[in-house]
Amino acid sequence: MGQVNMMRITAGALAVALPVVTAVVASHPARAEAGACSADIYSALRKPAPEKAKPVEIACDLTLAKTDAITRPIAFSGSAASGATLDCNGGTLDGRTAKARTVWIRSVHRADGSWDAPRDIQIRNCVIEGDVRIEGLGSNGQAEEVRLSSLEAGHTAQAQAAAPSGITLDDITFVANGGIPLYTAPGVTEMTVENSRFTGSTNGTAIYLDAESARNRIIGNMFDIRTARREMIAVDGSADNRIEGNIFENPIKGGIFVYRNCGEGGTIRHQKPERNVITGNTFRYTNFWAARPAVWLGSRQATSTYCFSRPDRPFGSSLSPYDYAQYNIVTGNRLPGGRPGLIVDHDEHNTVSDNR
């Protein structure tokens, strides 16, 4: 029990003694906060973007007008951007013609070799035509900084410490135009995407959770997106995520695949794709006969040609190329127009039940 003190509160001539309890609680980092953006930032965003426009840096709170159609790329870089909020108020971030990312949330590599990561950024009420990238050590699993880190036993912890954390994307309409609309690079943790819609078409996935990422939440979204070749959500060496209450419209190329990349680009993937919870989702089919699985635990299992082993690095995918998609929970999902066989478990120690 915490320490009890006495505090006297006076209202007019009346004095009442109230007990004040100083509770002993676990310490958690406080959410970072940012101040309001200046008029100069808003003005810079609203200017037409040249062909090779550099992103406008946001390290503040900004609300757009509903009629805004921003063509300039936007970046949230390093801890300076921590706590920033972008509320589009129904406006559009239009990255269809830009050479850069539409929205780029990134860590900054300091001169001393350390990484300065942003956290607690909120983006809401936006139409995003293009993509959102959340990056720490590198842009993807094959980036050189990621590869070099992967040669050391503490790679997962290092990747997570270097990557953005606590990013929230709420009430977003993602309009894919060929690329992956939401990509979380190695090490990203505590990302939430909720109450959002994925539309358009992509040659990749709708969401990619890359290696060493963890504790991300994909909750209550609509996936009405055409994926030309791949599943809608890739859980690639990513752990402890929750994918719940989403609707997948006709996921013929696949719904949610859980696996571990076995060495593409010379990078050792360390973390196993385990302890993920996939529950209460709806996979709606108009024709399931040619459909790939709605959920596939262990979808690769050493079948890729780039798998490799290094005896001097006996960990992760170098020690074994198999997925180890284990201790996952897949329950209470519905497949109207489909069949239970669209839930596939090719690994061990998973809980798969009440999917119909």
Image (cartoon, rainbow, N blue to C red):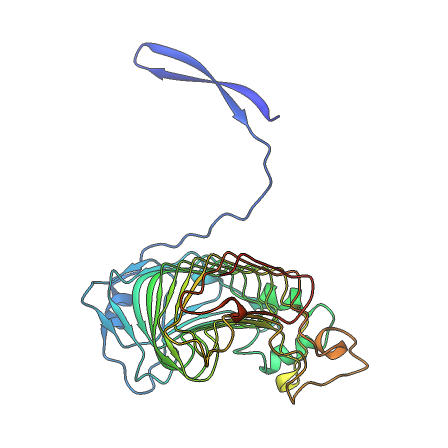
Q: Quadrant of residue 90?
A: bottom left
Q: Position of residue 175 (x, y in %)?
A: 32, 74
Q: Tell me if 312 is positioned left or right of 228 in this view.
A: right
**135 or 342, which is in the foreground?**
342
Extreme residue toward the right, this view:
311
What percent of the width, then of the height, locates residue 164?
A: 51, 64
Q: Quadrant of residue 277?
A: bottom right
**Relative depth, front residue between 85 and 319:** 319
Q: Is residue 99 above or below residue 31?
A: below
**Residue sitting nearer the eye, 338 or 229:** 338
Q: Is residue 57 above or below residue 19?
A: below
Q: Position of residue 339 (x, y in %)?
A: 48, 68
Quarter of the image with the N terminus is: top right
Counting every numbered tag in the picture gives 0
Judge by depth and name the residue closer to the eye, 50 or 71. 71
In the image, 67: left or right of 198?
left
Report the residue at 61% width, 83% height from top. 144
Displayed quadrant of residue 71: bottom left
- Residue 32 lies, in percent from the top left, at 46, 52
- Residue farthest along the left direction in this orientation: 67
Residue sticking out furthest to the bottom: 305
